[in-house]
Amino acid sequence: MDIPERFLDRSSESDEDDKWSLAARTENGLDLKLGRGQVLPKGFKISGRQYGEVKLGFCLSKGTLEVEVICAKDICPKEKDEPDTYVKTYLRDGERWLQKRKTKVIRHTRNPQYRQTLKYNSCDVLGRNLLIMLWAKKQGFESNQGLGGAEVNLDLLPLTHLTVDWYTLFPIHTLGTQTADSP
């Protein structure tokens, strides 16, 4: 699937949009760049491991929130084999996870190009967060492996115009799931 033209046009973005980007200071005093509206996971501690980033676009159009999963980069940098990956999203209402959507599997790359639009009804997103999780598809009876995830507070995004940003991935367990296996 091709990326819709509105997700490619970055001319509408300006320095004014930088106010939506966040930098979080960790307990160790290190600055960590977060995407627009991204929520820092509770209890997250800096480790030497990197989980990569995912590039997302958000746009509210005709009563529908369109989440464009564009690409990911720098995933599994230390593994020998290149993973088969997909992205799974949920709306989060408190501790409940609602309305799962997922992309197709992209095979054998650490820098997958998804270029897929996931849609949610706009009345379902108000006051909720969006969980974005990157998964490695395993063969046979093995459980799929969580590679990293991010949480975005949709109320903090300027959804009236296109918002595109990179979102830092954190360990899957920091998003409130008890396991690194696919829910």
Image: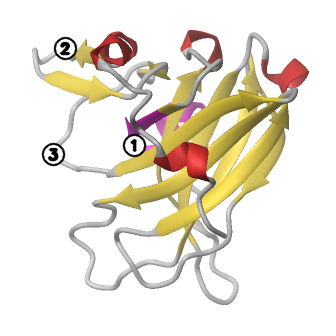
Secondary structure of the residue carrying tag 2 is: loop
Residue 172 in view in this figure:
no
Residue 98: quadrant of the picture: top right
Residue at x 89% of width, y 19% of height = 123
What residue sits 25% from the left and 27% below the top? 33
Quarter holding the N terminus is bottom right
The magenta segment:
164-177
Q: For the residue marked with disc 1, what is the amino acid?
A: Leu
Disc 1 element? loop
Image mark for residue 153:
none
For this rendering, which residue is in front, 29 or 23?
23
- How far apart, in angstroms, are the residues tagged by discs 3 and 2? 14 Å
Q: Which residue is mark 3?
A: 48
Residue that carries the numbered disc 1 in the rendered image: 169
Left or right: 180, with 95 as reference point: left
Label 1 crowd (10 A; few <14 / some 14-19 / many >=20): many
Left or right of 47 on screen, residue 43: right
Sooner in the amino-acid sequence: mark 1 or mark 3: 3
> Helix, strand or loop at disc 3?
loop
